[in-house]
Image (spheres, rainbow, N blue to C red):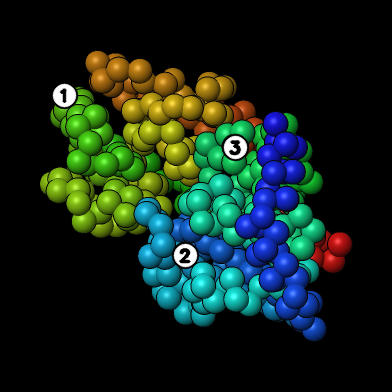
Amino acid sequence: MQRLLAVYRLVHPGNLFRRGRIYARGRAETRTVYFVPHNRNNVRLLADAAQLLVDGGIQCVFAHIDGLKRGGVARPELNARGMSHISFAELKRTIRPCDMLVTGNDYAPQFFRRFIDSINFGMVRVVGLIGGARLLQPHRFVRADYILSMGPAALQQRRQPTYIVGSPVIERAVENAGARHDEGLFVLVNFKGDIEDLADRQSIEAVAAACAKLGLAHVVSVHPTMFAKVDMPNKSPVDFAQLLPDALALVTRPSTTVYEAIACGIPVVLFPLVSPMVEFDSPMGAFKPTWSEHQLVDDILAAVRSRPTYFEQSRDFLNANLSIDPKMPASQRIANALIDIYNR
């Protein structure tokens, strides 16, 4: 099926026209690596690696698609880091044959998917960064020519040449391992849903009620795109990574925050569940999915009690989905992989 889709994308008249227009520009004297982050996490994953490429004499440019899609935004993070960037429209005008494009998302939104269809198949090398949870779904990263993955699970899932590079974001969480308060201070609740959705609101209210029944304080960490809409007394403006080391346990839906918590030795309660679960269908003892709000009290209590031995308990799940090399930071591993692809 993927091969049939690839043939369709290759010969689609619109893609042929766009590909011809790019080809007519000709190859530039200096090849460029374009980074297209879709959200702030993509920026955090790629920024240091891009700087390493620049230090090695490779021209790098960040392009954003803010304002053209719903969800996360990248431009505020780029600005906070003092990084220059161009718009998506400018990217389309300037990309040339033999350049490279690095992205954390090759499957949405539709206009970006069509753009990739018009530049790959040998014209522009497309590198997909699998830097988060649940990204191994079959329809994702089929357009990328090369894959960078934070863990070895992708080796069994992807046909393209795949580099295991770890995650700079989770490595920074590892640096925080060993909480500032040995016993923890509160249950950390990671909210990534839609507060206007009745099911999502009921889920977070059920977690708050379970914590109250146990006599445990709780703090709600809200995804930045939803922060202004969530009106809850326990909502914290502090960044998730700063809250995590002081947590008794983390309650979250299937998310990359699970890896961050495990790396810090913070027990995980998986709630509410989503479909498809992907890697979370095989917890390997790291957590027990909470199927109903009626299980929350028992599961939160069990998680808190497991805190002293939790890191060892969850090591197999972490190693299957995340690679950490104590001799080489993830940003350097990403840079090395991109240099290897650049020189092919």
Q: Position of residue 131 (x, y in %)?
A: 57, 49
Quarter occupied by the N terminus: top right
Q: Position of residue 183 (x, y in %)?
A: 34, 38
Question: For numbered disc 3, what is the local secondary structure?
Answer: loop
Residue under numbered circle 3: 139
Residue most toward the bottom?
29
Labels 1, 3: front one? 3
Q: Amino acid at mark 1?
A: Lys
Q: Nearer the viewer, residue 56 or 111?
A: 111
> Which label sits on residue 116?
none
Q: Position of residue 38 (x, y in %)?
A: 49, 58
Q: Earlier in the sequence, mark 2 or mark 1?
A: 2
What separation in Å lies between label 2 and label 1 (alpha carbons)? 44 Å
Q: Work out whether residue 32 can be spotted.
A: yes
Image marks 1 and 3: residues in contact by CB distance under 8 Å: no
Rendered position, 165 above or below 338: above
Q: Which residue is mark 1?
A: 213
| Residue drawn at 65 percent across, 64 percent down | 18
Q: Give amino acid for label 3.
A: His
Q: Is residue 48 above or below residue 300?
A: below
Q: In terms of secondary structure, where does tag 1 sit?
A: helix
Spatial separation of the CA atoms under disc 1 and disc 3: 42 Å
Q: Nearer the viewer, residue 179 or 242?
A: 242
Q: How many marks?
A: 3
